[in-house]
Image (cartoon, grey):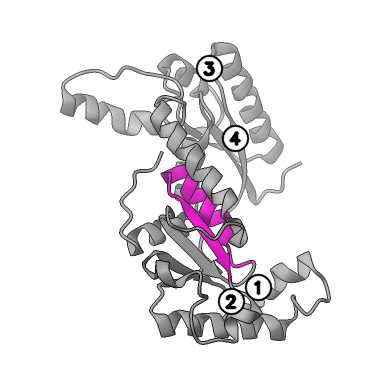
Amino acid sequence: MTQAADRAVFFVSDGTGITAETIGHSLLTQFQGISFRQLRLPFVDDPDKARLAVERINEAATDSGIRPIVINTLANQELSKILYGSQALVLDVFDTFLGRLEEEFGKPRSPAVGQTHGLVDYHTYESRMDATNYALKHDDGGDINYTNADVILVGVSRSGKTPTCLYLALHYGVKAANYPITDDDLEETQLPARLRPFKNKLFGLTIDPERLHQIREARRPQSRYASMKQCRTEVEEAEGLFRLHGVPCLNTTHTSVEEIASKILVALNLERNMF
């Protein structure tokens, strides 16, 4: 039995559901104080699957006693009609915009399943994979040849460098390396020697010491690495290093990886379209 405070939100798509989920998250964050139970229903691409989706949606309505919300990105209008037979508030993302676009362009839509995140452009796909391989190879200073890097993220351990690099690679095709600042680096007032030739590619990530302590404590309990004193010292010295050398910096404590990536692109003037 779902708690009364939890409202079920379904992201229904004929593809991966990433678009529906991304748009849905953006909408839900506008409503503070409401608890949501979010469920993705991907690959709903025929009437039988649409009816099964309706069954799940109606079960959630019965269990909770609260009308569910459905964020729908089904390209097939006949399948969308099936969803409208559910006990949910159905928000059709395509219908919200496509009618006005049809009017503007003077032609009807040509619905295609899975075009948003599908493998529709092999060149684009290869760019994403190359960037992802680059991020993995250059993770945590694993490869220090940064000649081909678009950006090099620097920061103390556990400040969010790796997930941001992978997000930049997968969604923008950005070749992002990351370099972990160590105690040895912090003992000097200069940037690490291997980073100096690439200063214009550097972007610093920092984090509140309290949050860093929580993250590290979960990884290495009761260690010097995770101690509050160590976390506070590393963050303060790293931020001082960024200020001294004019490295743009962002605090990741309360910032999503999507927002971090967007701010990096703007700060370094990397004009890339999202895949």
Q: Is residue 175 magenta?
A: yes
Mark 3 or 4 closer to N-term?
4
Q: Label 4 neighbourhood size at 10 Å, few (<14), some (14-19), many (20+)?
A: some
Contact, CB < 8 Å: mark 3 with mark 2?
A: no
Residue wearing tag 3: 45
Local secondary structure at mark 1: helix
Q: Separation of disc 1 and disc 2 at Cα?
A: 6 Å
Local secondary structure at mark 4: strand
* Amino acid at the residue labelled 1: Leu
Which residue is at 22% across, 24% downward?
A: 102
Which residue is at 49% across, 40% downward?
A: 130
Q: Separation of disc 3 and disc 4 at Cα?
A: 14 Å
Q: Which residues are magenta?
A: 158-180
Report the label total.
4
Q: Label 3 neighbourhood size at 10 Å, few (<14), some (14-19), many (20+)?
A: some
| Residue 24 visible to an observer of this rendering | no
Q: Disc 3 or disc 2, which is closer to the eye?
A: 2
Q: Position of residue 224 (x, y in %)?
A: 78, 80
Query: Toward the viewer: 275 or 133?
Result: 133
Residue wearing tag 2: 208
Residue wearing tag 4: 40
